[in-house]
Image: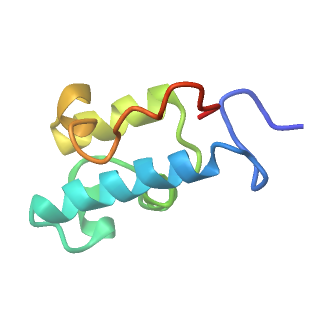
């Protein structure tokens, strides 16, 4: 059984978590940070924890907000690319 706010490897939402991680990584790189470690250190985030976020792991709403604050982007900006609405009737 997964802990509240976490997901397992068999989670049907795994693809969506990965998309979140990919978007976080893309924004970091677009801001000129080629190293996730340097970014995490300069923005006051734990290096290992931030690495998990970019892989779509351990991402709950509070953690996502923390990362977006470090990236200095709003939720609207974050979701402006790569998160189109699923077709009606979709379970995702």
What kind of colouring is applied to the model shown? rainbow
Residue in the foreground of this view, choosing between 74 and 13: 13
86 lies left or right of 71: right
**At x 48% / y 33%, what residue is drawn?**
87
Residue reaching furthest right? 1
57 lies above or below 29: above
Q: Quadrant of the N terminus?
A: top right
Q: Quadrant of residue 42?
A: bottom left
6 lies left or right of 86: right
Q: Position of residue 85 (x, y in %)?
A: 39, 32
Q: Position of residue 88 (x, y in %)?
A: 51, 25
88 lies left or right of 64: right
1 lies left or right of 91: right
Q: Position of residue 48 (x, y in %)?
A: 49, 61
**At x 50% / y 55%, what residue is drawn?**
18
87 lies above or below 42: above
**At x 24% / y 41%, what residue is drawn?**
70
Q: Quadrant of residue 67?
A: top left
Q: Position of residue 50 (x, y in %)?
A: 43, 54
Q: Quadrant of the C terminus?
A: top right
1 lies above or below 9: above
């Amino acid at each position: 059984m997964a802990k509240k706010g976490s997901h397992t490897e068999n989670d049907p939402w795994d693809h969506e978590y990965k998309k979140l991680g990919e978007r976080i990584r893309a924004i970091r790189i677009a801001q000129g940070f080629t190293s996730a470690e340097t970014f995490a250190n300069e923005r006051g985030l734990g290096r290992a924890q931030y690495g998990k976020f970019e892989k779509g792991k351990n991402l709950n709403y509070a953690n996502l907000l923390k990362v977006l604050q470090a990236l200095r982007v709003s939720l609207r900006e974050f979701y402006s690319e790569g998160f189109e609405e699923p077709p009606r009737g979709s379970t995702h």
